[in-house]
Image: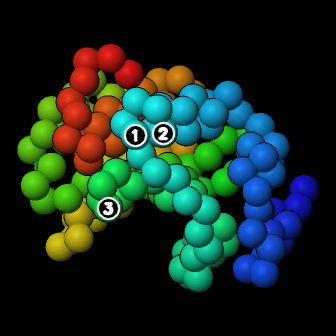
């Protein structure tokens, strides 16, 4: 299978429909709808030259504040959610209700002055719920429904 970065080099920005077709996951569609409709986040396809994750990704921002960045995979996406120092205490509480997978990713992600950058593979409805809950911290919207 051809990798995302090979299909869409820097000179070939993918259309939204091409992103959806490549990922082909209802969880991705639900995450995107949640971010755009519930949190009113603006989405933008951007190219990253980052050595760890080069290629096109989708960034979601609310009022200039980054909520998450989504990386394309076949059949799923990886959501990068940053937990800043101001959100650390609230994140600890949210994590109590998260999956063991999400708690493990959090524990194994080093804290820096820019926060913890959690890379979560959205491969189940439970992990999707975790991502929504963590993004809500960034969006300043704590909700019991996910």
Question: For this rendering, which residue is in front, 59 or 23?
Answer: 59
Tell me: 71 left or right of 99.
right
Mark 1: few/some/many CA within 10 Å (<14, 14-19, 20+): some
Residue at mark 3 to residue at mark 2: CA–CA distance: 14 Å
Q: In percent of the image, x 54 and y 44: which residue is there? A: 121
Among numbered discs 3 and 2, the one appearing first in the sequence = 2
**Residues at discs 3 and 2 in contact (Cβ within 8 Å):** no
**Residue identified by numbered label 1:** 40
**Residues at discs 2 and 1 in contact (Cβ within 8 Å):** yes
Q: Is residue 108 visible?
A: no
Tell me: 95 left or right of 86.
right
Point out the image quarter for the C terminus. top left
Point out the image quarter for the N terminus. bottom right
Among numbered discs 1 and 3, the one appearing first in the sequence = 1
Helix, strand or loop status at disc 2: helix
**Residue identified by numbered label 3:** 64
């Amino acid at each position: 299978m051809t990798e995302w970065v090979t299909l869409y080099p820097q000179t070939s920005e993918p259309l939204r429909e091409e992103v959806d077709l490549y990922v082909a996951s209802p969880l991705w569609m639900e995450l995107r709808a949640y971010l755009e409709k519930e949190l009113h986040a603006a989405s933008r396809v951007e190219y990253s030259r980052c050595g760890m994750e080069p290629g096109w990704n989708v960034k979601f921002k609310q009022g200039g504040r980054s909520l998450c960045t989504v990386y394309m995979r076949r059949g799923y996406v990886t959501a990068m959610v940053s937990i800043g120092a101001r959100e650390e205490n609230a994140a600890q509480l949210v994590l109590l209700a998260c999956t063991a997978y999400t708690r493990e990713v959090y524990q194994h992600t080093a804290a820096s002055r820019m926060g913890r950058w959690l890379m979560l593979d959205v491969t189940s409805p439970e992990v999707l719920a975790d991502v929504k809950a963590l993004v809500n911290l960034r969006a300043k919207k704590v909700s019991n429904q996910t």
